[in-house]
Image (spheres, rainbow, N blue to C red):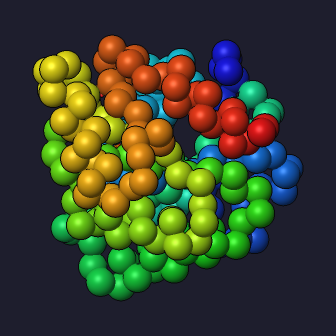
């Protein structure tokens, strides 16, 4: 999709605040610092629309971005913070669980992992959870420019194995600075959103 117009329409903590427009929604999930803001900025052709997170744990809201009056990107606050309290973590859990399990408009989830390492315990839990609820999920491996191209297959295999995926079809190697993987991610999103 060629994106010219994007607007943050709501930072929600509660279902009554979700937009009522009815556009399909694509959620983006991942650990803090994995590169979610950078991915979002590449997808929407901006340099700094989605704020890159200098303060992990600060944005504990679901941020709904209206993309071209056609769909919403829903930025789910990053998991795996060391700093937030147990109460905060529980609140976060309830908020995203409510959204991910009860939202009819949600058509797919883009789950980010760091290409340089095996998915973490948090990443595995998130993936298993999404699979359990039957949510179509794309795994985007960020920062792939930081590993040699000759090791990409190895990185993809490690992700497949750690997440226990049946195949590598839904894993995309991505690089924000090089914009590698942008079209593949968009293709998947459009397929889920508009079928
Ligand atoms: P977020 O917390 O998940 O939103 O992560 P950010 O998008 O803020 O990225 C965290 C850090 O990783 C920043 O310093 C980014 O510049 C860097 N980063 C994100 N994506 C990439 C990538 O694809 N390649 C490289 N080399 N760095 C990246």
Left or right: where 139 falls relative to 144:
right
| Residue 49 seen in render | no
Does the rendering let one see residue 116?
yes
Can you say whether 29 is above or below 94 in the image? above
Residue at left 19%, top 51%?
Answer: 118
Q: Which quadrant: the N terminus?
A: top right
Name which residue lies at 45% across and 76% down: 93
x and y percentages locating residue 97 in the rendered image: 55, 74
Q: Quadrant of residue 142?
A: top left
Q: Quadrant of ligand 1?
A: top left
Picture coordinates of residue 179 (x, y %)?
Answer: 40, 17
Return the residue nearer the eye: 167 or 11: 167
Q: In which quarter of the image is residue 172?
A: top left
Q: Which residue is drawn at 41% across and 62% down?
A: 127
Q: In this view, does 150 lie to the left or right of 46?
A: left
Residue drawn at point x = 51 percent, y = 66 percent = 131
Outermost residue, right side: 21
């Amino acid at each position: 999709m060629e994106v010219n117009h994007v607007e943050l329409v709501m930072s929600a903590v509660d279902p009554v605040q979700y937009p009522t427009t009815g556009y399909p929604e694509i959620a983006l999930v991942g650990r803090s610092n994995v590169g979610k803001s950078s991915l979002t900025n590449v997808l929407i052709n901006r340099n700094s629309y989605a704020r890159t997170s200098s303060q992990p744990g600060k944005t504990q809201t679901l941020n709904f971005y209206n993309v071209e009056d056609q769909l919403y990107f829903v930025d789910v606050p990053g998991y795996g913070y060391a700093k937030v309290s147990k109460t905060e973590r529980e609140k976060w859990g309830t908020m995203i669980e409510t959204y991910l399990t009860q939202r009819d408009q949600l058509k797919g989830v883009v789950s980010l992992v760091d290409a340089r390492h095996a998915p973490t315990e948090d990443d595995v839990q998130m993936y298993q959870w999404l699979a359990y609820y039957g949510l179509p999920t794309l795994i985007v491996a960020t920062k792939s420019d930081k590993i040699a191209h000759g090791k990409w297959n190895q990185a993809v295999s490690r992700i497949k194995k750690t997440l226990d995926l049946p195949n590598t079809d839904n894993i995309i190697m991505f690089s924000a600075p090089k914009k590698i993987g942008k079209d593949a991610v968009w293709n998947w999103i459009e397929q889920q959103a508009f079928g």
